[in-house]
Image (cartoon, rainbow, N blue to C red):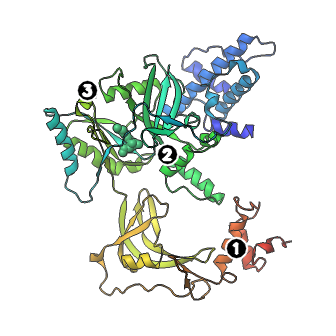
Amino acid sequence: MEEDLFSLAAGKQPSQQAKNEAGSQAGEPQESAAPVQPGKTEEDVRNRVDYLRSELRRHNRLYYEQAEPEISDAEYDALFLELEKLEKAHPELAEPDSPTRRVGGAPLQGFNQIRHAVPMLSIDDIFEQRDAPVPDEELVEFYNKLVKALKTETVPVSVEPKIDGVALSIMYRDGRLAYAATRGDGDVGDDVTANVRTVRTVPLRLRGDDWPDYFEIRGEILMPYASFDKINAEREAAGETLFANPRNAAAGTLKQQASAVVARRGLDCTLYQLAGDDLPFTNHWESLQKAREWGFKISDQMRICRSAEEIDAYIAHWDEARRELPFPTDGVVIKVNDFGVRRQLGFTAKAPKWAVAYKFKAEQALTRLDSVSFQVGRTGAITPVANLEPVLLAGTTVRRATLHNAEQMALLDIRPGDMVYVEKGGEIIPKITGVELSQRPADSRPFEYITVCPECGTPLVKYEGEAKHYCPNQGGCRPQIIGRIIHFIRRKAMDIEGLGEETVELLYENGLVRDVADLYDLQ
Ligand code: IVH
């Protein structure tokens, strides 16, 4: 287990030799690089530990912040492992913010509650109107209000992607991470310090020395698409339920009891606000540039705008360009830059008057419904599925969408041949949200739902309180039988090694298994 945790923890990274070479090439001083030999003094060990810690920190920065690793993952692992061994052998050298402490071994006992020194407020939303005039009226209204209230012509505002993750507040004392809490109800959140310490882009110790002795920094814990896809692929292979979207995955991960699990899930953190009354800054931009110098990850997309038109152009750009960002976004956050001006504007009962979140609409596409097919699940439940003319939506080609059940289909009056709107909401499977009636073919007829099972021909039944139709032929309907066996052998159930879906199908086709008991009679 130990080994396992280690390799998971180190995840991506950097060997001794290569790092030394890279270091010398870069002309960096080589601290005490000599490996500790038998007969080493206590001081040798301490030097070696210091050296390893500083190297690991440097490689973390190179890897995560600059995306310019100098050494391979295996090499990084070797450094990490050496440090871990030395720390184990010399407990007196332990340090809470050592790079090895990124991985918590012991599970947390529930979560303690933390009261936020400064409440974590929400901000007002402006919802994108499809086909709305440009620039958006509500946006112009927000900006004009600022101009009017401040009796000036321009009010510089920062504009940043609204990251679709989980809000987090992190406390730093004397340049070290003290604790981290979720937003909770805004006043009190969960103490997720152990888990946040495993997030590589959250500095445990700050660089430089010009940070306030005590401050709070807020941002979003997020799951990049790459991590999300990897985790869901693993979960699918293991027969586990999939995360619906990266935000759910980030939230679920942050609440994990075992921080070793968190460490390997590839979470990331972007910070967007310093909180506190006596910060040594006059504006947002300056405060975040400093935060970046201290080692925090700050949005590379942040800009300053000076008119409603500029804000609108930024929004229009990212409404499209966000598809190329490696992390999920659901809008743009607009905030007055100057802290003095923020104070002047103040708050409503629930939100600052100096900020607003512009929310993008869920991505939609219009395409033709070619046909409807029906899936029979392991319980006999029937799900109608739309076969679509392939269309590009939120970065992927969509060919199928769920139609849920007969009732839903009737409600939307969906008919094959219709042009339909497909949307990717929070769910993995896209759904059909409407029909473009203006494009309905003249000879179109209402859709008639099936009455018999598409697999075995048995008349379907509808149970009270159930939205779906069912095929009652449990013992003789192929997808139900195979579905049950596959469900039985999954990792979460019996976890039968060497038996996969395809083999089950093959065994069934050849008349070798009809139920799970047959598995045990196989020769
Ligand atoms: S600023 C008082 N900036 O969206 C201002 N929030 O709808 C605090 N969010 O609670 C928020 N990206 O969880 C801000 N660049 C960003 C953001 C951002 C995502 C989240 C955050 C906030 C919510 C507001």
Callout 3: SS = helix
Amino acid under label 1? Glu
Label ID, residue 224:
2
Q: Which quadrant of the figure has residue 438?
A: bottom left
Q: CA distance from mark 2 to mark 3?
A: 35 Å
Answer few, some or many: residues within 10 Å of disc 2's Cα (few below 14, many 20 plus, some between 14 and 19): many
Q: Which residue is mark 1?
A: 505
Of circles 2 and 3, the one toward us is 3
Quarter holding the N terminus is top right
Q: Farthest residue in the right direction? A: 523
Q: Point out the quarter of the image occupied by ligand 1.
A: top left
Amino acid under label 2? Pro
Label ID, residue 293:
none
104 displayed left or right of 514: left
Q: Do we see residue 104 in this rendering?
A: yes
504 displayed left or right of 231: right
- In front: 184, or 201? 184
- Asked if labels 3 and 2 touch by Cβ distance under 8 angstroms, the answer is no
Q: Do we see residue 21 in this rendering?
A: no
Q: Earlier in the sequence, mark 2 or mark 3?
A: 2
Label ID, residue 340:
3
